[in-house]
Image: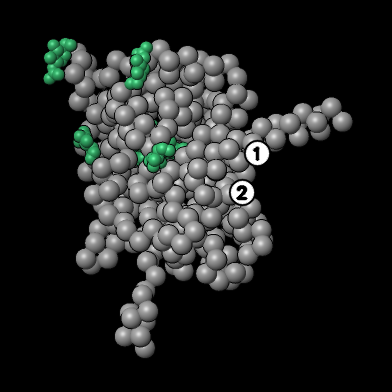
Amino acid sequence: MKRFSSLASALAVVTLAAWTAAVGACIDVGFYDQTCPSAEALVQQTVAAAFVNDSGVAPALIRLHFHDCFVKGCDGSVLIDSTPGNRAEKDSAANNPSLRFFDVVDRAKAAVEAACPGVVSCADVLAFAARDSVVLSGGLGYQVPSGRRDGQVSTEQNADDNLPGPTSTASQLATGFARKNLTLDDIVILSGAHTIGVSHCSSFTDRLYNFNSSDKIDPALSKAYAFLLKGICPPNSNQTFPTMTTLMDLMTPVRFDNKYYLGLVNNLGLFESDAALLTNTTMRALVDSFVSSEAAFKTAFARSMIKLGQIEVLSRSQGEIRRNCRVINPTTTQLVAAS
Ligand code: HEM
Ligand SMILES: *[C@@H]1O[C@H](CO)[C@@H](O)[C@H](O)[C@H]1NC(C)=O
Ligand SMILES: *[C@@H]1O[C@H](CO)[C@@H](O)[C@H](O)[C@H]1NC(C)=O
Ligand SMILES: *[C@@H]1O[C@H](CO)[C@@H](O)[C@H](O)[C@H]1NC(C)=O
Ligand SMILES: *[C@@H]1O[C@H](CO)[C@@H](O)[C@H](O)[C@H]1NC(C)=O
Ligand SMILES: *[C@@H]1O[C@H](CO)[C@@H](O)[C@H](O)[C@H]1NC(C)=O
């Protein structure tokens, strides 16, 4: 009984956070309760099946949602394919070749389309899938406000202008996240997603070979780790091994836990943007608190993901419900012309 009531109050906290956060953005928990009651379960089943086969699905979907939300809001724009006239977000340097498992989103969307055609947006499918990925990897679940609509614009330029790069300093991260109404705390909390997943060599080779220091290695990186990384990513690995990747959390690479922060304080953060979290005393204090409390991290992460999912959402009659997440819906005239 005692266990049950503490679980119930933990859930209540996260539910309350979801509700308050959702007020401004016109999206609500349970948006599809009447129109497509199986939507969230269908997405969860699709993600779970893919995750059993390859646990890399979880970090991939979490990052897809982040990169969707930071570029023109959480509107599914990251899922749109390039066309002959337009290079889309997914083909920007920050996204290609590193974003992966678009096919899992396609399968989740196909499942909800089969159950309720034209009802559930791609942006919501991705928001649900990211939450399911957190849970499957061992993080805390949270209720996802939904009712997002899909955008009809996706350009490489918008991605270049909005996505933070791995060489970002603390103040650059602060500026970039503030533009999305996210705080210094959110930066530290959401960077905790680097507790799972992988990175290509190109995201950190500057720290190994090109740094302005006597041995050319970033002094903020553990020497032992730097030598290990040099073995995985030789000089010019950008060209010679463009598909080579390495784990981001050496200790527990597929567990959604607080080991990212433990690595960070031991100079094992993979990117300069990770190490940057130690350079600002406010950020550093939060890092230290997560080293001491995994529960605090997991609760904070759930709350910040809900905030991330509110960024510039389209709702009600804005945008559209895309039928195929890769393609903007054809207009009526295009359909008539094609028939
Ligand atoms: C603070 C600014 C951030 C920067 C500069 C950053 C940068 C990066 C980079 C460079 C990679 C590796 C890409 C590659 O080379 O393959 C990566 C991976 C990843 N990032 Fe971040 N990131 C940031 C914040 C976030 C946030 C807010 C989330 C989600 C809440 C996130 C989730 C992930 C995940 C899960 C991966 C692994 C992806 C995979 O295994 O497919 N990151 N990040
Ligand atoms: C299982 O994972 C492997 C490796 O990622 C992939 O090639 C294969 O297509 C996946 N199979 C299914 C059914 O998802
Ligand atoms: C931490 O970073 C924020 C945002 O850049 C800045 O306002 C604050 O002064 C910094 N704090 C310290 C102690 O450096
Ligand atoms: C940030 O918040 C302000 C005030 O609520 C809002 O007008 C603006 O659209 C928000 N920006 C983003 C990127 O969500
Ligand atoms: C590898 O590629 C990254 C990103 O394209 C670039 O910034 C970096 O300078 C390259 N590093 C090396 C060692 O070629
Ligand atoms: C490299 O670092 C030294 C010492 O900190 C500094 O004086 C110099 O300006 C730096 N050079 C570059 C190119 O940043």
Of callouts 2 and 1, the N-terminal one: 1
Q: Give me the residue at 37% from left, 53% from top.
A: 78
Report, in whole angstroms, how far the alpha carbon at label 2 lies from the one at label 1: 9 Å
Quick check: 291 left or right of 180? right
Could you tell me if residue 228 is visible in this image? no
Q: Residue furthest bottom?
A: 339
Q: Quadrant of the N terminus?
A: top right
- Could you tell me which quadrant the C terminus lies in? bottom left
Q: Position of residue 305 (x, y in %)?
A: 51, 38
Please, what is the three-letter code of the amino acid marked with disc 2? Val
Secondary structure type for disc 2: strand
Q: Is residue 25 left or right of residue 207?
A: right
Please name whichever residue, 106 or 251, is drawn nearer the observer in this view of the structure.
106
Instruction: Give the camera-side residue of 143 and 267.
Output: 143
Residue visible at 27% across and 19% down in the picture: 218
How are the colours assigned in the image? one colour
Give residue 333's quadrant in the image: bottom left
Question: What is the crowding at mark 1: few (fewer than 14 residues within 10 Å), some, or many (at least 20)?
Answer: some
Say what amino acid the circle numbered 1 marks: Thr
- The answer to whether residue 195 is seen in the rendering is yes
Residue assigned mark 1: 15
Q: Which mark is residue 238?
A: none
Give the number of the disc on residue 29. Answer: 2
